[in-house]
Amino acid sequence: MRNTTTTVVMAAGVILAAVAGTQAETHYVDVNNCPTSSCCFAGGMGCDDMPCQDLVCAAAANCCDVEWDSTCVQLAEFFCGNLCVQEGTQVDPYCSIQTAIDSAVDTDEIVVAPGTYFETINFLGKAIWLHSSDGPEVTIIDAQQSGSVVTCQGGEGPAAL
């Protein structure tokens, strides 16, 4: 939940200015804390949590008849509670850096735990501070030769780190 603050500037008991702003949030990412259920990932037929699979397949038969795709994952997140959803907090960190970027707004901080992240990331024009909790020596983003590891094509300025 984003905190809103108001700064009031007063002189001689008169309000000169009131400026409202939002406080930056910190988002946490840890590849070692990812959901393990196959319901949370696209690919294959069905998933390993039978009650969840039954709910999803009742809503969209193709999830069990054709392929478990991103729509099936979204339905699993909806029907099966916290099976796949992560909050981005220290206690319940995101599993991917891009998910944290998607959730962030300008001035937010993203703290990435040590590990190898097999993904590409796009800053989406956001002025955010992305860094490793323990340094670049132990935190790797590996695009597996699928393109640029980091994309900054959305008008990111010098405030995007």
Image: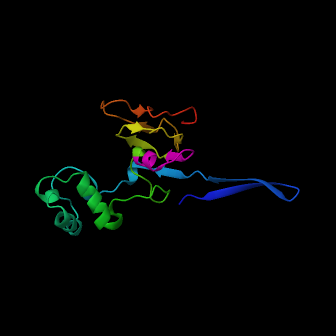
Range drawn in magenta? 99-111
Please check the rendered image and state whether residue 109 is part of the magenta-colored stretch, yes or no: yes
Whether residue 45 can be seen here:
yes
The spot of residue 141 in percent (x, y) is 40, 37
Would you say residue 37 is visible in this rendering? no
All told, the count of numbered labels is 0
Image point 52% across, 40% down: which residue? 131
Asked which quadrant contains residue 13, the reply is bottom right
- Is residue 138 or residue 87 the one in the foreground? 87
Residue at image coords 27%, 62%:
76
Judge by depth and name the residue closer to the eye, 71 or 96: 71
Q: At 36% from the left edge and 64% from the top edge, which residue is drawn?
A: 82
Which part of the image, by quadrant, shows the C terminus?
Answer: top right
Is 133 magenta? The answer is no
x and y, in percent, of residue 21 in the image: 63, 52
Side (left or right) of 78 relative to 22: left
Residue 153 location, quadrant: top left
Q: Position of residue 31 (x, y in %)?
A: 39, 48
Asked whether 29 or 20 is in front, the reply is 20
Left/right of residue 24 with respect to residue 126 in the rendered view: right
Is residue 107 placed above or below 9 in the rendered structure?
A: above
Q: Residue at x 31, y 61 (%)?
A: 77
Residue farthest right in this picture: 12
User: Does residue 34 lie above or below 148 as drawn?
Assistant: below
Left or right: residue 52 compared with residue 98: left
Report the side of 105 relative to 32 (left or right).
Answer: right
The chosen color scheme is rainbow
